[in-house]
Image (cartoon, helix red, strand yellow):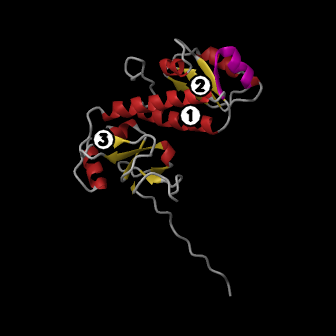
């Protein structure tokens, strides 16, 4: 008798009942409330409703409550009916905070800064052209970090022979603050979990900024 196998379609939820933990799968995909596209949680934005009925961006995906997910996309955050979309998902009337887009952008910039700083403290990230070049030549780099406005020619010289390395571009003040300096242009981070986290945060940040990195006057320090 021939064996038959049942196939089931993966269910992509619009919301969750709480952050990952207690057996919940952190890698389960989520569906954007606005675009209806789905993706990995680490590349999307989670929101919850606070006790006052206001929507709160949960960028670390750790806050309790019903999680509502959006693509990390500027157009999605600027959707005119966003309050209604959130209210329907939350099953209650909610209020959007003023400047939601800017708040999310600033929060993601802070997470970039924290991610690079963590790599520095762990000894996995260094800055300075020569130090970066030495690690690239040694094959000890998982991601290259460049300040916005860095010379394209100099970046090409830095990457010479290793042009397949992933490069992220961050506001110059974010990179400088990550190393406690007044100015920093280039940094690299070793392969591993911290580098992967940084690349995921960069993907969200550039989605929200539509690929145009804001300067220090428009991003909170």
Above or below, 40 against 72 in this view is: below
Q: Where residue 71 sits in the image (x, y, percent)?
A: 42, 44
Q: Is residue 9 left or right of residue 164?
A: left
Q: Is residue 14 left or right of residue 3?
A: left
- Residue found 36% across the figure and 53% down from its top: 66
Disc 1 + disc 3, Cβ < 8 Å: no
Q: CA distance from mark 1 to mark 3?
A: 27 Å
Q: Is residue 171 left or right of residue 15?
A: right
Question: What residue sits right under mark 3 in the picture?
Answer: 79
Of the residues under marks 2 and 3, which one precedes in the sequence? 3
Q: What's drawn in magenta, residue-wise? A: 124-136
Disc 2 + disc 1, Cβ < 8 Å: yes
Q: Where residue 6 sits in the image (x, y, percent)?
A: 57, 75
- Residue found 49% across the figure and 43% down from its top: 43
Q: Where residue 186 sits in the image (x, y, percent)?
A: 61, 19
Assess whether residue 128 is covered by the magenta stretch: yes
> Viewer-proximal residue, 39 or 103?
103
Of the residues under marks 1 and 3, which one precedes in the sequence? 3
Question: What residue sits right under mark 2 in the picture?
Answer: 145
Question: What residue sits right under mark 1 in the picture?
Answer: 198
């Amino acid at each position: 008798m021939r064996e038959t196998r049942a196939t089931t379609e993966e269910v992509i939820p619009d919301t969750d009942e709480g952050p990952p933990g207690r057996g919940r799968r952190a890698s389960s995909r989520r569906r954007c409330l606005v675009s209806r596209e789905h993706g990995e949680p680490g590349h999307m934005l989670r929101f919850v409703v606070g006790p006052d009925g206001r929507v709160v961006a949960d960028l670390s995906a750790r806050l309790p409550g019903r999680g509502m997910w959006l693509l990390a996309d500027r157009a999605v955050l600027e959707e005119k009916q966003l309050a209604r979309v959130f209210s329907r998902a939350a099953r209650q009337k909610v209020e959007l905070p003023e400047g939601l887009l800017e708040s999310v952008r600033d929060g993601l910039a802070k997470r970039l800064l924290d991610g690079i700083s963590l790599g520095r403290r762990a000894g996995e990230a260094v800055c300075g052209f020569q130090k970066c070049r030495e690690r690239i030549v040694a094959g000890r780099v998982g991601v290259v970090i460049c300040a916005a406005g860095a010379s394209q020619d100099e970046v090409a010289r830095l990457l010479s022979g290793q042009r397949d390395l992933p490069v992220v571009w961050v506001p110059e003040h974010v990179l400088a603050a990550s190393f406690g300096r007044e100015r920093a242009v280039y940094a690299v981070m070793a392969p591993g979990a911290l580098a992967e986290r940084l690349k995921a945060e960069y993907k969200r940040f550039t989605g929200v900024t539509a690929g145009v990195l804001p300067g220090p006057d428009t991003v909170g320090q």
